[in-house]
Image: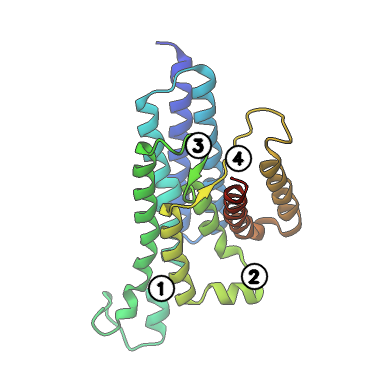
């Protein structure tokens, strides 16, 4: 068998490997390292499809591997991050009389709160399965792609100041969780960032967004990521509205 046939699948498995490492770091609350490996996994996720097309080796195996790898890196990891950000068992124990090694959920139902974070994982799973059978998403997206959502959620621990205090309110985090699962599966057309030629007129929206993203990253660094994802969604909605008016 030709080696080139396996290059995209190897990249996909590297994506999965990065996701597994990110899970370990989230478990230890090393969110910086987890975010790095999520980014690295998304990098491999982008180039597995790129090389599959360039080498002409796209196939059903690659499609299935891609979804399974994304399920970990862009599904399990952000859900686990949200689980860790929501008030932990230890925090409730400090303010209660719970002394047992195993918490009593009857005494304090709030101990169940962190598990709601995995609604993000469920939403990602549904989107990935639906994406494989939705023929409308070849050149653009409908609903927020799971990698973008993973970047958004995984970057929330790095917010600072008043914004940190606002976002890390348990009820705000739950609202973000529910909104995240919804936006991934909503019928919201989002523009693709794939630039196939160097036509500024054709890709001015994509190029403008990428330039703005670079400026925000230079200015705000990692804390710019949630803002960039929000801008991406808003620009897509505005672009869709303007396109409809022009018809």
Q: Which residue is mark 3?
A: 45
Across and down, in percent, residue 143 comes to 46, 50
Residue 135 circle label: none
Upstream in sequence: badge 1 or badge 4: 1
Upstream in sequence: badge 2 or badge 4: 2
C-alpha separation, residue under disc 4 versus residue under disc 3: 14 Å
C-alpha separation, residue under disc 2 versus residue under disc 4: 29 Å
Image height of 176 relative to 24, above or below: below
Quadrant of the rendering where the N terminus is positioned:
top left
C-alpha separation, residue under disc 1 versus residue under disc 4: 37 Å
Which residue is at a point 56% across and 38% down the rendered structure image?
43
Q: Are marks 1 and 4 in contact (CB under 8 Å)?
A: no
Which of labels 1 and 4 is toward the front? 4
Which residue is at a point 73% across and 46% down the rendered structure image?
211
Count residues near mark 1 (Cα–Cα under 10 Å), then give few for <14, some for 14-19, many for 20+: some
Q: Which residue is mark 4?
A: 193
Across and down, in percent, residue 77 comes to 44, 53
Q: Which residue is mark 2?
A: 160
Quadrant in the picture for residue 171: bottom left
Across and down, in percent, residue 163 comes to 62, 73
Across and down, in percent, residue 159 comes to 62, 66
C-alpha separation, residue under disc 1 versus residue under disc 3: 32 Å
């Amino acid at each position: 068998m030709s080696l080139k046939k396996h290059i995209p699948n190897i990249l996909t498995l590297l994506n999965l490997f990065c996701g597994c490492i990110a899970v370990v770091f989230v478990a230890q609350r090393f969110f910086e390292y987890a975010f790095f490996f999520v980014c690295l996994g998304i990098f491999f996720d982008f180039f597995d499809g790129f090389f599959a097309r360039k080498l002409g080796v796209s196939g059903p195996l690659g499609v299935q591997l891609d979804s399974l790898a994304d399920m970990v890196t862009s599904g399990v990891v952000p859900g686990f991050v949200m689980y860790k950000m929501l008030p932990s068992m230890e925090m409730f124990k400090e303010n209660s009389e719970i002394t047992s090694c195993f918490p009593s959920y009857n005494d304090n139902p709030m101990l169940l709160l962190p598990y709601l974070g995995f609604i993000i994982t469920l939403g990602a799973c549904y989107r990935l399965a639906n994406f494989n059978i939705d023929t409308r998403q070849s050149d653009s997206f409908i609903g927020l792609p799971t990698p973008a959502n993973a970047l958004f959620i995984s970057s929330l621990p790095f917010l600072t100041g008043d914004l940190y205090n606002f976002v890390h309110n348990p009820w705000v985090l739950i609202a973000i969780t529910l909104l995240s699962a919804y936006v991934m599966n909503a019928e919201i057309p989002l523009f693709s960032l794939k630039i196939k030629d160097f036509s500024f007129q054709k890709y001015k929206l994509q190029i403008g967004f990428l330039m703005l993203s670079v400026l925000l990253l230079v200015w705000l660094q990692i804390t710019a990521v949630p803002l960039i994802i929000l801008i991406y969604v808003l620009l897509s909605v505005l672009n869709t509205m303007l396109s409809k008016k022009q018809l």
